Image (tube, coloured by chain):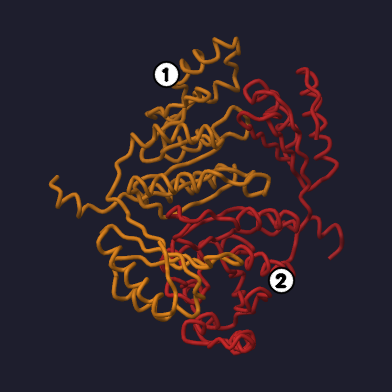
Chain colours: A red, B orange
Amino acid sequence: MTDAELENEPAPTAAILVIGSEILSGNTQDANIHFIAKRLVQRGVRLQEVRIVPDVAEEIIGAVNALRKKYTYVFSTGGIGPTHDDITSDCMAKAFGVDHMVAPEAKKRLEDYYKNSGTEVNEARLRMATLPAGSVLIDNPVSAAPGFQVGNVFVMAGVPKIMQAMFNHVETMIEGGPQLFSLTIECNQKEGDIGDELGKIQKNFPDIEIGSYPHMYQTPSLSIVVRGTDDDMVHNAAAKVKELLRKMGEQPFI
Amino acid sequence: MTDAELENEPAPTAAILVIGSEILSGNTQDANIHFIAKRLVQRGVRLQEVRIVPDVAEEIIGAVNALRKKYTYVFSTGGIGPTHDDITSDCMAKAFGVDHMVAPEAKKRLEDYYKNSGTEVNEARLRMATLPAGSVLIDNPVSAAPGFQVGNVFVMAGVPKIMQAMFNHVETMIEGGPQLFSLTIECNQKEGDIGDELGKIQKNFPDIEIGSYPHMYQTPSLSIVVRGTDDDMVHNAAAKVKELLRKMGEQPFI
C-alpha cells in the first residue's frame, strides 16, 4: 500500500477480556487493563471495550464471541493455569467450535522447563498444554506454559509479570495503526466554568477528541486531553484550549 | 418472608459499567471497580460482570440495555460532569426511552451549593441537573451535583472521591443478599503440584467455589480462596484444603 492508502486504512480496534472471578469478588485488583491500554496506544491500536467476566463457561464463551466479531483483536487475561478453575482454554475452543487437544510443542516446552527442576508434568500441568486446535503459541519466558492465539483472540496469563512478558511477543503478532497523538493540558479551572467554551472548541475540531478530567483535592485540578491522528491538528486544538485558559487568567502548561 | 424463604431467594446480581475513554486510552487507571466490588460483597450482592466503554453514545446505550436486562443492579461511573464529553445522563434517558429534562431538585442543589461561592449556574453546570425523567437523586456530599437512579441503574461520578461518597447513599437504596463467606489459605505450593488434588476437593463441594491465585516472586506464593454462602461448608472445604497442604509438608495459614 502507498502511504496515502495506509493513512486511509481504518485503525485496528481491540477489546480486553479479563477472565477472573477473583476480581469480581473484590479479592484481587486487576493490574493488566491499564498496562495493555497504554501499550496498545503506542501501537496505534484503538482499545474500544473491556469486559470482566467470572470463571463461568457460558459467560466466557458469550463474551469472546461478542468481542471477536466486533473488534480487530481481543486480548484475554486469566484462567490458563493448571487448576480446576482455569477453564479459559477449553472455552476458547468451544467459542471457535474447534477441538481442544494437547499441542505437542506446548507440551515439549513444559517438559523441557520442568526437566531441569525434576518437576513432573502431571495431569494438572498437562492442562496448560491442551489448547484449541490451530492455536499459535505465545512465548512465556517467565514460566514456560505458553499463551496462545486462536483466530483474532490472544490468550494470556492473568499474573501480571507473566502477562507482560507474553505481551512482548503478542506485539510482534499484531498489525499496528496510525499513531494517536495526545497532548495533556493541566490547569486549575473548574469544569463548570470552562465547559461551555470547551464545547465550542470541540465543535470546531470534529476529528479531534477533547476530554476533560477533574482531580479532587489536587493541583493542578483539571487535565484537558486533546487526542487525534493528525499531529498538527492536535497542536492547533491544544493551542485554542490554551488561548481559552489564558483568557481566563491562567498560565496553562502541557 | 420467613427466614427459610429468604435463604432460598436468589442473591441479587450486579454489573459495573465504567464510562470513560480516558481509561481505554491509558490516560487514567480505573480506581472504582475494586472499590465497588468489595462493597458489593459485603452487602451480599454478586458482581457478575464489568464493562468499560468509551464516551460514545451508541456504545453506552447498548451496554446499559444489555446489562440492565441481565442483572438486578447496574452501577455506572463517569460522564456526568459539565463538559461536552459528559454524555452519560443523555444516554441513560435514551436507553430507557424517557425524556431528558432539568430536574428541579437537582437544579436547586446546584444553586444552593454555588450561591455560597458566588459561582454562576451557567449552561455547562445546568447539564448536571438535566436527568432522565423519573430519576431518583443520589446525594453528592462532596460537590453537590447529584448522581441518579433510573430503573435499576445507579449513575455515579467517575472521580473516585465523589463516587465513593455517592456509593454510601446508593447502599441504602439497594437490597442486599445472603452474606458470601470467604476464607483465604496462603501457602507456597506450586499450582501444578496441587492442581489435581484441589480439583477433587472442588468436586466434593459443588456449592463452594475454590479459586487458586498464584503470585510471582512472592511469599506466600499461592492464595487458595474458598467462597460460599454456607459458613460451615466453607470451613469444611477449607479444612480439606489445609489437610491436603499438610500432606504435602506445609503448615498453611489462613
Element type at mark 2: helix
Q: Which residue is drawn at 48% across and 52% down?
A: B50
Residue A214: percent from left, percent from top: 63, 32
Say which residue label 1 marks: B105
Q: Residue A169 carries which label?
A: 2
- Image height of A67 relative to B102, above or below: below
Q: Which chain carries label 2?
A: A
Q: Judge from the rendering whether residue A233 lies leftward or rightward of residue B31; answer left or right.
A: right
Q: Residue at 41% across / 66% down in the picture?
A: A56
The N terminus of chain A - image quarter: bottom right
- Element under disc 1: helix
> In this rendering, which labeled residue sits more in front, label 2 or label 1?
2
Q: Residues within 10 Å of mark 1 (few under 14, many from 20)?
A: few
x, y percent for residue B198: 39, 76
Is residue A76 visible in the rendered image? The answer is no
The x, y position of residue B240, in whole percent, is 32, 73
Q: Position of residue A38 (x, y in %)?
A: 69, 53
Q: Residues within 10 Å of mark 2 (few under 14, many from 20)?
A: some
Give the residue at x 60% y 30%.
Answer: A216
Q: Which chain carries label 1?
A: B
Seen in the picture, residue A164 relative to A30 is either above or below; the reply is below
Q: In which quarter of the image is residue A219?
A: top right
Q: Marks 2 and 1, how far apart in space?
A: 55 Å
